[in-house]
Amino acid sequence: MVRPGLLPTARRLRTWPPVLAASSRYLDKVGAPASPDGLSDHALILGPIGVATTWSLRKGGTTKSVRVDGRLIVRTNEGVIAAAVAGLGIVMTSLGACRRELDGGALVRVLPDWDVGSVELNAVFASGRAAKPAARAFTDYLAGALDEV
């Protein structure tokens, strides 16, 4: 419970763009969607970022909203990425979460010209003196470590 007059403070640590990605094996088998409308013809893996029933993608002045029905729903980023690497479908996850798989070729971007927004990572702690010095120190450490990612 927050004491009266003490509102929590949030500090943005990092912002990542979400990306759509799939394994080359999956895309070789079923083909890559040419537009957001084509996503409905694909197996979609829903996870922590992409669990919404609608994904909105933007390109230039155009916004497309696509109703998604997941083939698989996984509650962890590691799980959705592993499922995509295994060739189970297309996943929406943050660039930071799947950068290693993209750089290593285990995953490739799908619809890379379309923007799917951004995901923020925030540290939330008590404001003012109520925040423990250790919490502030850890937040500073984490912010620096994430800058290197």
Image (cartoon, helix red, strand yellow):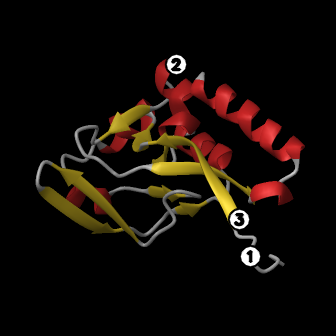
Mark 3–mark 1 distance (CA, rounded to whole Å): 10 Å
Residue position marked by numbered label 1 in the rendering: 5
Q: First in sequence, mark 2 or 1: give its number.
A: 1
Residue 95 vs residue 47, the one in the foreground = 95
Q: Is residue 57 visible?
A: yes
Mark 3, mark 1: which one is toward the viewer?
Answer: 1
Placement of 140 over or under 46, stated as above or below: above
Rendered residue at 45%/35% (across/down): 23
Q: Amino acid at mark 2?
A: Gly
Residue position marked by numbered label 3 in the rendering: 8
Q: Amino acid at mark 1?
A: Gly
Residue 12: where, in percent of width, then height?
57, 47
Quarter of the image with the C terminus in it:
top right
Badge 2 local density, few (<14 within 10 Å), some, or many (20+)? Answer: few
Could you say which quadrant of the image residue 124 lies in? Answer: bottom right
Determine contact: label 3, label 1, CB under 8 Å: no
Left or right: where 22 falls relative to 100: left
Give the residue at the far top of this rendering. 104
Q: Amino acid at mark 3?
A: Pro
Rendered residue at 58%/27% (across/down): 147
Secondary structure beneath dot 1 equals loop
Secondary structure beneath dot 2 equals helix
Could you say which quadrant of the image residue 83 lies in? Answer: top right
Residue position marked by numbered label 2 in the rendering: 104
Rendered residue at 21%/60% (across/down): 37
Residue 31: where, in percent of width, then height?
28, 42
Residue 136: where, in percent of width, then height?
79, 43
